[in-house]
Image (cartoon, rainbow, N blue to C red):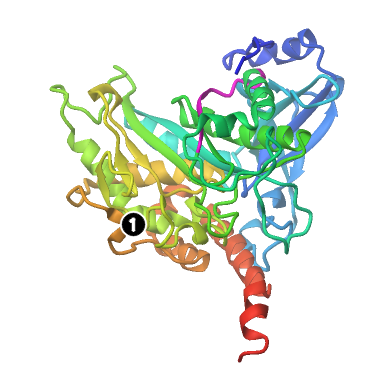
Amino acid sequence: MTRKKRIRRSVPAELPSQLRNWLDENNIEEIEAVVPDMAGVAKGKILPAKKYQDDVGLRLPETIFAQTVDGNYPTQWDVLGDTDSDIFLKPDPGTVRQVPFAEDPSAVIIHDCFYLDGAPVDIAPRQVLRRVLDLYEARGWNPVVAPEVEFYLVKPNTDPDYPLEPPVGRSGRAESGRQAFSVDAVNEFDPLFEDLYDYCEIQEIGIETLIHESGAAQMEINLLHGNPMDLADQVFLFKRGLREVAMRHKIYATFMAAPMEGEPGSAMHVHQSVVDAGSGRNIFSNTRGNESRLFRWHIGGMQKYLPDAMALIAPNVNSYRRLAPDKWGTPINTAWGYDNRTAGLRVPVSTPQARRVENRIAGADVNPYLALAASLACGYLGMVEQIKPSPPVSTNAYGAESQLPHTLREAVDGLLECEPLREILGERFVRLYASIKHHEYDTFLNVISAWEREHLLLNV
């Protein structure tokens, strides 16, 4: 694949006053002022660039963070009060990018949210992640992450009752079998990925590799490691960009955790480590290059708290179809091991400076801000509470006992009952998030499935 030269220049995060100059220099006509909502969907306003006032900000109703994934609202959202008041948007200058799929020269800017008194909106997903990162910073630690995002390409599907199917590639045929790691299977969609690489270059999304995964037309992209907020922004922008470029090629791209019956689920694996803020040294390794106690405690915290954080890393009713015991490639517990992909927590082979742990439990359907916040919060709790992990496993962990919730309702209840996670993520956020997810689960139970009509209609 050929990759086109980048056509934009970054706006330094430390020079927000240059935002207007950047917009003028790039002849930007339209601004997408966006905020990630609870599901990781872009909410906001579109306006002419000449009317965009980055020093004044825009307003949105606070209830954008109370919407369910289907656009409704939970019956109980007492943490927001009764007035549905405004929140104020402030641009993060380092997030400005050109919108490569817009007809007119446009830019997207991710915004943070504030109340009238200047306090940050504590229920905003970006602020939840920032809250966790601040805890690390207070101890002189800088977490580093590298997400790996899986997704499916599927034929356009306008009937939700009709099962998804693999799309037709350049050969004129759809995949009939699994083509894991096949280069030729990736090249079936070469025109799509050519455009995707161009989009990612323009939006400064650091794709390191692209591979074909185990499912039919299932792919994975790996992002270069870096600051968690920056990587969450990249995943947020990548999902939107991929869906757009796929539709332009008359294909759908989906990040559902389990979109196709009988096929492997899609994950967002997260490689995470922590470096000393002063020296840049990986604190997971000691001065002799061996594993540090902090490394073991980080794993111990993830083992203890990830089951209670599942509502954030498996956030939808569909997420738990992926986590079924018979799904190959999907961990069902928090076992850890060295280079063991059957374990929920894998320690890859690496140098001491690159020592890290890979969280393989999170699904591709996550809000990246909340998933990274949850995963890092669990590791943080392990380090400050000095939690020792269980012995590493060197056998097939798929056969071990399941340690994770089996439904979204069970996961949400676990989050509500976990005081340390409520304190780190914020009480108001957890209460509102739980209300949203309880509503989604109850709504899902009102839907009668084809399986029920098939097997129960005339038999019970």
Q: Position of residue 427 (x, y in %)?
A: 49, 55
The local secondary structure at tag 1 comes to loop
Instruction: Name the quadrant of the C terminus.
Output: bottom right
Q: Is residue 245 above or below residue 438?
A: above
Q: Position of residue 6 (x, y in %)?
A: 65, 11
Asked if the magenta segment contains residue 211, the reply would be: yes
Residue 449 visible at all: no
> Residue 142's image quarter?
top left
Question: Which three-letter amino acid code belongs to the residue tagged 1?
Answer: Asn
| Residue under the point 57% across and 38% down | 126
| Residue under the point 22% across and 51% down | 395
Q: Is residue 34 above or below residue 374?
A: above
Label 1 belongs to which residue? 333
For the magenta stretch, what is the residue range?
Answer: 202-212
> Residue 318's image quarter?
bottom right
Residue 194 visible at all: yes
Q: Viewer-proximal residue, 419 or 286? A: 286
Q: Position of residue 369 (x, y in %)?
A: 53, 40
| Residue under the point 83% across and 21% down | 49
Question: Image check: 143 left or right of 162?
Answer: left
Q: Position of residue 97 (x, y in %)?
A: 68, 21
Asked if the magenta segment contains residue 254, the reply would be: no
Question: Image check: 170 left or right of 438?
Answer: right
Q: Residue furthest bottom?
A: 460
Q: Viewer-proximal residue, 300 or 137? A: 300
Instruction: Name the quadrant of the N terminus.
Output: top right
Q: Residues within 10 Å of mark 1 (few under 14, many from 20)?
A: many
| Residue under the point 73% across and 40% down | 251
Q: Is residue 406 above or below residue 185?
A: below
